[in-house]
Image (tube, grey):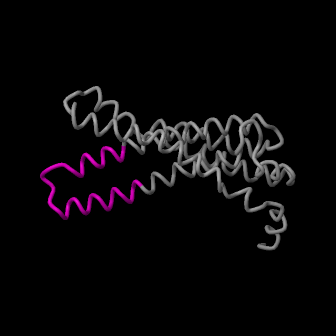
């Protein structure tokens, strides 16, 4: 089985799957969205903690519903782009949706880290409570960051340069349509089932 899969996917190169230089763009986008959000939380809680509008905006930004909904649609679009890898439009649509989802995730992450710093500095917590809170919430932040970076990685797989399909999709379209359909349908159907179960 391993040899069979190796033969089918042997035409893929390391650069088709590993971002390398493109990873810099991911971190540039991350800091462009996360840093202002982080600073806003600190500013609002330091100078205007009584303003309900700011607190409501932070709470709504941290809520995962928007990221989950758009992310699910983006993953579905990724599956469609894999199935129809011979066409450029599905890849473009998937790229845009996934990129927007990643940006929203970066904004949410910045808000989360800001709230984490605010809660960690609150009075009334003993040292072991601060330690436990810091470790558990820190682990959750790493998980959230990894999930969001995975979304960016999928956008890289469909289009790593503006206006053209990625090398991954170009080589994928040379494979038999059964393989493309199997991979794309697995992703699309899985996301559809998860999304339906959440509604």
Position above or below: 157 against 94: below
Percent position of residue 88, x then y: 79, 37
Q: Quadrant of residue 10?
A: bottom right
Position above or below: 53 against 115: above
Front one among 80 and 198: 80
Percent position of residue 127, x then y: 17, 63
- Which residue, as the protein is rendered here, is positioned at the far left? 124
Q: Main secondary structure of the magenta part?
A: helix
Percent position of residue 3, x then y: 81, 73
Give the tally of numbered discs: 0
Q: In which quarter of the image is residue 109?
A: top left
Front one among 182 and 146: 146
Position above or below: 134 against 181: below
Percent position of residue 34, x then y: 43, 42
Query: Could one spot residue 196 in this view of the protein?
Result: no
Q: Which residue is drawn at 73% across and 62% down?
A: 14
Left/right placement of residue 172 relative to residue 67 reads: right
Front one among 34 and 150: 34
Query: Could one spot residue 140 in this view of the protein?
Result: yes
Quick check: is 101 in the magenta stretch? no
Q: Which residue is drawn at 71% across and 36% down?
A: 92
Magenta residues? Answer: 112-141
Front one among 4 and 93: 93
Left/right placement of residue 94 relative to residue 138 reads: right
Q: Quadrant of the N terminus?
A: bottom right
Left/right placement of residue 17 relative to residue 176 reads: left
């Amino acid at each position: 089985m391993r040899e069979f899969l190796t033969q089918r996917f042997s035409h893929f190169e390391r650069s088709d799957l590993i971002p390398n230089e493109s990873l810099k763009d991911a971190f540039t986008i991350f800091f462009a969205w996360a840093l202002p959000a982080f600073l806003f939380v600190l500013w609002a809680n330091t100078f205007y903690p009584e303003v309900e509008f700011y607190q409501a905006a932070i709470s709504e930004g941290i809520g995962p519903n928007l990221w989950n909904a758009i992310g699910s649609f983006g993953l579905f679009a990724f599956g469609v782009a894999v199935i129809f890898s011979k066409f450029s439009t599905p890849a473009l649509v998937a790229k845009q949706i996934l990129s927007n989802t990643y940006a929203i995730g970066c904004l949410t992450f910045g808000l989360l880290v800001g709230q984490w710093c605010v809660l960690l500095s609150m009075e009334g917590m003993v040292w072991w409570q601060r330690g436990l809170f810091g470790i558990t919430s820190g682990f959750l932040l790493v998980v959230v960051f990894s999930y969001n970076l995975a979304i960016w990685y999928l956008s890289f797989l469909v289009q790593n340069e503006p206006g053209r399909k990625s090398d991954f999709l170009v080589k994928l379209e040379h494979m038999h349509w059964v393989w493309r359909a199997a991979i794309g349908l697995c992703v699309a159907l899985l996301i559809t089932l998860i999304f339906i179960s959440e509604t």
